[in-house]
Image (cartoon, helix red, strand yellow):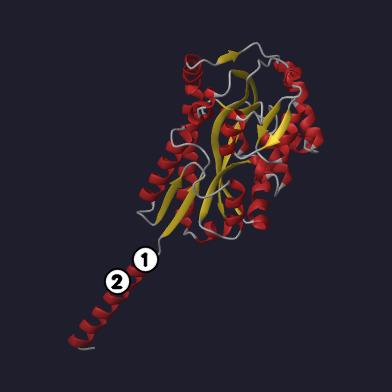
Amino acid sequence: MGSFGRRLTSVCAAAGLLAVAGGAQAETFTLRFNHVLSPSEPFHEGFQTWAKRVEERTNGGLKMRVFHSAQLGVEEDIIEQMRQGANVGQNTDAARLGSYVPGIAVINGPYFVETLDEVKRLSSSPTVKKWMDELAASRGLRVVCFDWVQGYRNFFTNKPVTTPADLASQRIRTPPAPIWQESIRALGAAPVAMAFGDMYPALQQKAIDGVELVYNNIPGGRFYEVLKYANETKHIMLINFEVVSAQFFDKLPKDYQTALVEECQKAGQETSARILASEEKVRAQLKERGMTITENIDLAAFRKAGEKAYQALNLTEARAAVYKDIGK
C-alpha cells in the first residue's frame, strides 16, 4: 500500500472512530422521577442528591429530573405509565406494589421491621429478592432500591390516642392499598382511602378525623394547623421503594444501571439516617406550633391489634419467611 493509501485508511479509521464516539455521545437517557412530597421534605433533597450523583457518574449519559408534589401525576397513574415502558420513576411503597405481587405488601405491615439495621437486612432476603424479580419480569416494575426510610408512622388526630380503643369510629386517611386499609382497621380506626394532596382540605372540612403519617410530613404539609395531637404509636416503619420501568431500566447500559442502583442505595441510607436523627427536632417544632405529643402509648396493645392485618390478608406465612431470612 502506498503512502496515499495508508493516509486514506488512517483518515477513514479516524472518521469511523468519530462516528462511533458521536453515536455513543448521542445515546443519552433521561429519567423523570416523581414523588408526592413537598420540596421542603428531606426526601426531596435526597432525591436531588441521587440525581446529581447519577449524572456525574455517567458523565451526563443518564440525567434524572426530580418532580415534587406529584407534579407528574398521582402514584397509581405513574406506576401504570412505568408498566407501559415510560421513562418515569416513582417513590412508592410496598403497600402499592403488593397490588401486583401480594407478598411484598408485608413490608408495610404493622411493626414489621423497626430499625434501620433490619431494613438493611431485608435486601439480602431471598424471599424479598424473589418478589422483586417477579415484579420486574411479570409486572414491568423494576425496584432500583428500597433503602429510603421515611421514619415511623404515627396517628395525628384532634383527640388523644393511647390505645386502639381510642381510635374507634375515627376516620383516618390511608393510601389506597389493602395493607394500609387493613392495618388501620386492625389498629382500631376506620380507614379512608385518599390521595396525599387531598388530606389538608379533607381535615378542614372534617371529612376525615385524622391521618397517619411520619413526623416530617406534618410541617411539610402544615397539618399542625388542622390537627392537635401527635400520638406516637410508631405502628409502621415507612420503607419507601424507588421504582422505574423495567423496560427503561433494561435499555440502559450496564454501567448506567449500576450507577442508578448504587447511588440510590447510598443517598437513601444517608437520607434515612438524617430523618430519624431529626425527628426530635421536628417534635419540638410541632410543640411550639401548638401540637401535643401523646407519649404514654400502650404499644403492647397496638402490637397485638396489628396482628389482625396479617391474618386478614393471608400474610402471616410471608412475614414468617422474611423473618427467617433476616434472623428476626
Q: Is residue 118 visible?
A: no
For the point 41% across and 42% down, which residue is it? Answer: 48
In front of the other: 78 or 110: 78
* Label 1 sits on residue: 26
**Residue closest to the far top:** 296
Residue type indicated by callout 1: Ala
- 274 to the left or right of 25: right
The amino acid marked with disc number 2 is Leu
In percent of the image, x 61 and y 29: which residue is there? 203
Where residue 195 appears, as percent x and y from the top left, is 61, 40
The answer to whether 148 appears left or right of 139 in the picture is: left
The residue under label 2 is 18
Q: Dot 1 surroundings within 10 Å: few (below 14), some, or many (20 or more)?
A: few
The location of residue 158, given as percent across then percent down, is 63, 19
Q: CA distance from mark 1 to mark 2?
A: 12 Å
Figure quadrant of residue 107: top right
* Disc with the residue nearer the chain's start (1 vs 2): 2
How far from the left and from the top, in percent, is residue 317?
Answer: 79, 37
